[in-house]
Image (cartoon, rainbow, N blue to C red):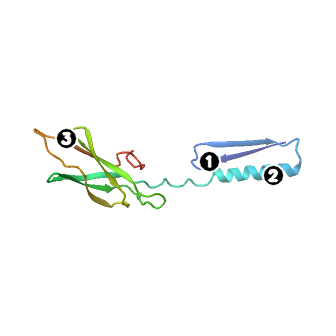
């Protein structure tokens, strides 16, 4: 006797086929095998959990005030950087003319939609004729983000 089970996985694109040849085993073992197979089918057909909501850190503004570079970082994603299980800790980087000149260590939580105004600990002196200033949020890519 052969028992065949079919189960469709939650995404309905894959099928799983389980079969057991029970011709040489006793009825108690058959019942146990059926129970185990039905248990595995129920696990396979559980709904898939929604993806974890993740942050999206973005520099939304930057300006010079005297010899300091100010900027605003915003969490545009649906997820929080909360520090609930692990303390918040990431770095934003300041590049001038392609050279890394400063990093700003952030230890404050950032909820979805929240923003922070920050200042780099760097004395900026403009050099003629111009400078290219670039600020990168989460420079070391500690947090998964929606745009990565």
Q: Is residue 136 visible?
A: no
Q: Residue at x 30, y 59 (%)?
A: 115
Query: Which one is in front, 89 or 27?
Result: 89
**Which of the numbered marks, if any, corresponds to residue 32?**
2
Label drawn at residue 9: 1
Q: Marks 1 and 2: CB-CB under 8 Å? A: no
The x and y percentages for residue 96 are 22, 41
What's the distance in space between the residues labelled 3 and 1, CA to CA? 53 Å
Can you tell which mark lies on residue 141?
none
Is residue 35 visible in the rendered structure shown here? yes
Mark 2 or mark 3, earlier in chain: 2
Looking at the image, is mark 2 or mark 3 nearer the viewer? 3
Badge number at residue 132: 3
Which is nearer the N-term, disc 3 or disc 1? 1
Say which element carries label 2: helix
Q: Residue 139 at what x, y percent from top left?
A: 34, 45
Q: Quadrant of the N terminus?
A: top right
The CA distance from mark 2 to mark 3 is 70 Å
């Amino acid at each position: 006797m052969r028992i065949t089970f079919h189960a469709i996985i939650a995404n309905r694109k894959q099928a799983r086929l389980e079969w057991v040849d029970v011709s040489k085993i006793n009825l108690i073992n058959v019942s146990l095998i059926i129970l185990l197979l039905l248990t595995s089918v129920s696990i396979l057909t559980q709904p898939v959990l929604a993806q974890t909501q993740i942050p999206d850190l973005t520099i939304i503004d930057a300006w010079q005030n005297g010899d300091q570079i100010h900027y605003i970082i915003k969490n545009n994603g649906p997820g929080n950087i909360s520090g609930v299980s692990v303390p918040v800790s990431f770095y934003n980087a300041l590049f001038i003319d392609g050279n890394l000149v400063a990093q700003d260590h952030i230890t404050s939580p950032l909820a979805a939609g929240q923003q922070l105004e920050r200042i780099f600990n760097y004395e900026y002196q403009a050099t003629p004729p111009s400078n290219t200033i670039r600020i990168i949020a989460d420079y070391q890519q500690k947090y998964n983000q929606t745009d990565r």
